[in-house]
Amino acid sequence: MSANAAAQLDTDAVETYLTANLPGFTGPIELHKFSVGQSNPTFRLTTPSGEYVLRRKPPGVLLKSAHAVDREFRVQKALAGTDVPVANMHLLCEDDDVIGSAFYVMENVTGRRFDDPSLPELDKPDRRPVHDEMCRVLSAIHSVDINAVGLSDYGPPGNYFERQVGRWSKQYEASKTDNIPEMEELSQWLQTNIPADDGQRTLVHGDYRIDNLLWHPSEPRVLAILDWELSTIGHPFADVGAVLMQWAMPPGTEGRGLAGIDRTAKGLITDTEFVESYCRHRGLPGIDKLGFYLAFNFFRMGGILQGVLKRALDGNASNPERAKKLGGFVPLFANAGLQAAKTV
């Protein structure tokens, strides 16, 4: 266990709590901190009784409604037994006195992770099935009967995008460290171009992308969807826009996008094919004003990264150096959002 990991998790306190509250658990704990998970620090706990994953709120002063591990726990627990693949949830601890913040413990799902949507580690014929599965699973999220699984109150009623644009505009203002005119302009454009409510009200993941999925070791099959912090009841096209937003970024380890790549030559799905496949899965005729949903996602991601940067400067980031690097991308996302807005 590294000194940095130890500073972010009191393993003795965790062991005492789990011994008393998690049936079958036995210590001691061997701790590994995952490098992924900028928002909520995430750890693998290796013990004589098995492996677990612990996800906690970060230390320090936090933005209102951010880092809601209780919501992450609730939604994944509710989805158990549905067509949406999630890890098994063990327990939620909301007592800040245990380790200094709320946390939950879940099953450790063993599988593959793909960080790059161009899937260079796979042979060409094996790439398209992965993107097809991404599309199928996304449609499964949006097809969940929220009343049947007890999530009808998981998000407020009303126009989802009106609510979200307002929320992320406030979040951005609360975490500003510099003036970025493009973010201000994009915020104003979104507020005046919100589509009329078409009545769709579904579960949305909020951060659906390939690196938030755990895959079967040898099959193009998702075993678990991770990082549900931004999930809510809202409009499904926000998730579709999130996928296309990620793919619009530059390729490589930083952008992790597909911009400029000849997707057909590489055996990858195109944006048009993805949207058409998604609509077939859900029985929809198509998606109007797709540019708005792209612009919204660029703005929200800019706001998220601004928050990551603010935590780094305040000394509360999970991975400070990476957090500062990510914060430098905020203007890039803002400009991309303004370009997407021109297509509406």
Image (spheres, rainbow, N blue to C red):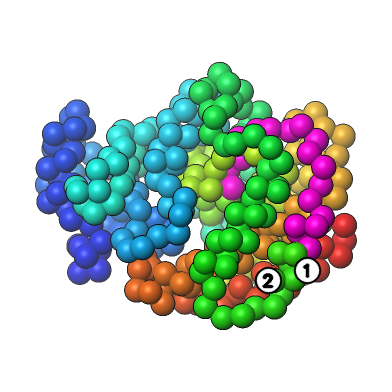
Q: Which residue is mark 1?
A: 338
Can residue 163 be found in the magenta stretch?
A: no
- Give the numbered dot on residue 183: 2
Residue 172: x percent and y percent? Answer: 57, 66
| Amino acid of disc 1 | Leu
Alpha-carbon span between mark 1 and mark 2: 9 Å
Span colored in magenta: 189-206
Q: Residue at x 40, y 60 (%)?
A: 62
Q: Main secondary structure of the magenta part?
A: loop
**Side (left or right) of 204 relative to 275:** left
Q: Residue at x 66, y 28 (%)?
A: 143
**Side (left or right) of 116 relative to 42:** right
Tell me which corner region of the image, top left, top right, bottom left or bottom right, holds residue 91.
top left
Dot 1 and dot 2 residues touching (CB under 8 Å): no
Q: Along the line of sight, which residue is nearer the eye, 55 or 255?
A: 55
Q: Along the line of sight, which residue is nearer the eye, 113 or 144?
A: 144
Residue 111: x percent and y percent? Answer: 44, 45
Q: Identify the secondary structure beneath mark 2.
A: helix
Q: Residue at x 18, y 38 (%)?
A: 18
